[in-house]
Image (cartoon, rainbow, N blue to C red):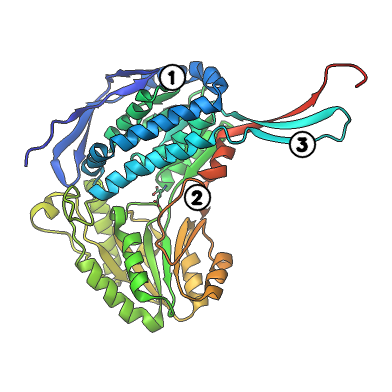
């Protein structure tokens, strides 16, 4: 199979595309690591200054552009994403490793997000209140924060940026964006969509660079807000730096999401959904199901179903339409996930499916990890129960009662999402009160997010305001309270 020629990466600053002059950078296909997908040179400190300056000089005009016009740009970008969904979906599969269907679906999802915010910007500009004083009205208007730093992870190369950039722009902010260096090509594609939609120069600036560039952005004097999604370690560091400078920050970080299967659940439905939650996108989602708590009464049957399904899941080159699960993003991820599984086995976990490194052909030469299910002993604390491996690994425990199942589900420092499988509405209502999570799925998998409702976690999964829907409007704007009276004496 011949590899397509690598795409040349460029940065996008002040409406112009330019080559960096830093060290070289290349993204490779995690299924076929010898294949370069895109290459170029990294941006450096000088480009951060230029991008910030461009975002500063564009911010007043963009903030004053009618929301309707800003929205029109976003809607044209959505159409551009839709037009390119096949090509860019394929590039996403080649660069990140998710399947073709997931890659195309993600580009279309980004389009849907741009449509939502393209239509939302001019819906409400604030509120009007009665005044206790005669001849006065009190208006609360919403205004953009200003220049937003956007730092995004590898696992949703175009949808996560869309969740941040679309509302930032819709509500009148300008952006300096640093995507994960493993997936620069899809970042270029999103910037192209906005460029061809007629976004004015300087409103969005894209810099491809090393992790340290996140620090340079957060420490820049011109920054007015920061939105981050990624690892807990990096997120806490950036959030602390932003907070230390008094800058509003939204950080979406780890998850160790549980699926709880109660004894009355429809086991076919639960098995199908737990498989999707644990193994779609190769388990590389902050919302992925990485813990399963199953009622003792159905545990043997349910684990047999999962073992059968996980062992027969088709793993391979994600650009092959018959494949259900692709590789993880790079060799370091493969090693750390397999190490985590090895540690769990050494600590007494029992292998239900997967678990062993592939030793032959494409699955061994690419960064593949088999879909893995481990049952943990009841009497011991295992690392895999707590640590986010960010891969296709599901850690299972049995529960003797619903109360114990909910206790186990809450037994994590994270609280992003959970999935509950039951046909009993009373149990579902209990779960709404008792499960300490930001997102609860009843009878569906733990991942998934719609643009018009809040997204984010309880406990240590996130820091600062949530994303999407009204939460996004709150984060990307501040209010000015206006006490408005007429200018004539004696009214
Ligand atoms: C989803 O569940 O479909 O980093 C989206 C993540 C999340 C997005 C999840 N911010 O995986």
Q: Residues within 10 Å of mark 1 (few under 14, many from 20)?
A: some
Q: Which mark is residue 261?
A: none
Q: Residues within 10 Å of mark 2 (few under 14, many from 20)?
A: many
Report the quarter where the N terminus lies: top left
> Toward the viewer: 441 or 18?
441
Question: Which label's residue is closer to the chain start, 3 or 1?
Answer: 3
Marks 3 and 2, how far apart in space? Answer: 31 Å
Q: Secondary structure at mark 3?
A: strand
Q: Residue at x 36, y 70 (%)?
A: 269
Q: Residue at x 86, y 35 (%)?
A: 132
Marks 2 and 1, how far apart in space? Answer: 31 Å
Report the quarter where the C terminus lies: top right
Estimate the x, y position of residue 89 in percent, counting from the top left.
26, 41
Residue under numbered circle 2? 456
Quarter of the figure with residue 67: top right
> Toward the viewer: 442 or 361?
442
Q: Residue at x 38, y 31 (%)?
A: 77
Estimate the x, y position of residue 334 in percent, counting from the top left.
23, 52
Question: Which label's residue is closer to the chain start, 2 or 1?
Answer: 1
Residue under numbered circle 3? 129
Closer to viewer: mark 3 or mark 2: 3
Estimate the x, y position of residue 330 in percent, counting from the top left.
23, 45
Q: Residue at x 28, y 35 (%)?
A: 84
Q: Which mark is residue 200?
A: 1
Question: Which label's residue is closer to the chain start, 3 or 2?
Answer: 3
Q: Is residue 369 shown to the viewer in this render?
A: yes
Q: Secondary structure at mark 1?
A: loop
Estimate the x, y position of residue 383 in percent, counting from the top left.
37, 63
> Toward the viewer: 334 or 58?
58
């Amino acid at each position: 199979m011949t590899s397509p020629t690598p795409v040349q990466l460029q940065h996008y600053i002040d409406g112009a595309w330019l080559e960096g002059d830093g060290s070289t950078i290349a993204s490779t296909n995690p299924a076929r690591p010898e294949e370069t997908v895109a290459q170029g040179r990294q941006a450096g400190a000088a480009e951060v200054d230029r991008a910030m300056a461009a975002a500063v000089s564009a911010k007043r005009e963009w903030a004053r552009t009618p929301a309707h016009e800003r929205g029109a740009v976003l809607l044209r970008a959505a159409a551009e994403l839709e037009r390119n969904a096949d090509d860019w979906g394929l590039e996403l599969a080649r660069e990140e490793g998710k399947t073709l269907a997931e890659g195309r679906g993600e580009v279309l999802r980004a389009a849907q997000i741009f449509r939502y915010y393209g239509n939302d910007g001019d819906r409400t500009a604030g509120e009007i209140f009665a005044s206790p004083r005669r001849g006065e009205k009190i208006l609360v208007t919403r205004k953009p924060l200003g220049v937003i730093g956007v730092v995004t992870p590898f696992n949703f190369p175009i949808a996560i940026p869309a969740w941040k950039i679309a509302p930032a722009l819709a509500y009148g902010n300008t952006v300096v964006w640093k995507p994960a260096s493993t997936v620069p090509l899809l970042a270029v594609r999103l910037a192209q969509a906005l460029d061809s939609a007629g976004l004015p120069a300087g409103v969005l600036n894209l810099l491809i660079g090393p992790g340290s560039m996140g620090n340079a952005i957060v420490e820049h004097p011109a920054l007015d807000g920061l939105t981050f999604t990624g690892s807990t370690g990096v997120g806490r560091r950036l959030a602390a730096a932003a907070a230390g400078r008094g800058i509003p920050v939204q950080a979406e970080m780890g998850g160790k999401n549980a699926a709880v299967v109660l004894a009355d659940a429809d086991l076919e439905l639960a098995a199908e959904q737990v498989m999707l939650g644990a193994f779609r996108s190769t388990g590389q989602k902050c919302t992925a199901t990485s813990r399963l708590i199953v009622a003792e009464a159905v545990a043997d049957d349910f684990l047999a179903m999962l073992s059968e399904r996980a062992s027969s899941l088709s793993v391979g080159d994600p650009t092959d339409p018959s494949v259900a699960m692709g590789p993880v993003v790079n060799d370091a991820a493969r090693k750390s996930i397999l190490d985590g599984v090895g540690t769990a086995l050494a600590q007494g976990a029992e292998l239900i499916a997967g678990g062993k490194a592939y030793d032959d052909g494409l699955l061994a030469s690419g960064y593949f990890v088999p879909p893995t299910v481990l049952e943990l002993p009841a009497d011991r604390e295992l690392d895999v129960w707590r640590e986010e491996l960010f891969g296709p690994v599901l850690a299972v425990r049995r529960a003797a009662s619903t109360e114990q199942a909910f206790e186990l589900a809450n037994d994590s420092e994270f609280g992003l999402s959970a999935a509950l499988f039951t046909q009993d509405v009373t149990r579902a209502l209990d779960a709404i009160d008792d499960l300490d999570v930001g997102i609860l799925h009843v009878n569906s998998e733990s991942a998934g997010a719609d643009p018009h409702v809040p997204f984010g976690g309880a406990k240590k999964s996130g820091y600062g305001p949530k994303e999407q829907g009204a939460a996004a409007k709150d984060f990307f704007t501040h209010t000015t309270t206006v006490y408005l009276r007429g200018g004539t004496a004696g009214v």
